[in-house]
Image (spheres, rainbow, N blue to C red):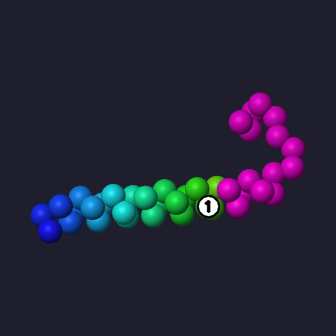
Amino acid sequence: MTNFPKFFGFLLSFFIIGIYWTVHHRMFTYVINYNSRLL
């Protein structure tokens, strides 16, 4: 139980990064054309 805060922080950060990745992936499914400026 002494490692619970670290484990909870790891799970929370993993969950938040997963949410950001999902939103990013859904947002860029609508991008049809791209150029070097966008990238």
Quarter of image, res 6: bottom left
Quarter of image, res 33: top right
Provide the secondary structure element on which disc 1 rests. helix
Most extreme residue toward the right is 33
* Placement of the C terminus among the 4 image quadrants: top right
Instruction: Please name the amino acid that badge 1 sits on.
Output: Thr
Horizontal and vertical percent for residue 19?
Answer: 54, 63
Horizontal and vertical percent for residue 27?
Answer: 71, 58
Q: Mark 1 points at which residue?
A: 22
User: For this rendering, which residue is in front, 30 or 1?
Assistant: 1
Horizontal and vertical percent for residue 23?
Answer: 63, 61
Residue 26 located left or right of residue 22: right
- Who's the residue at 78% across and 56% down the image? 29
Residue 9 located left or right of residue 38: left
User: For this rendering, which residue is in front, 27 or 12?
Assistant: 12
- Who's the residue at 77% across and 31% down the image? 36
Question: What range is drawn magenta here?
Answer: 25-39
Label 1 CA crowd tier, 10 Å (few <14, some 14–19, many 20+): few
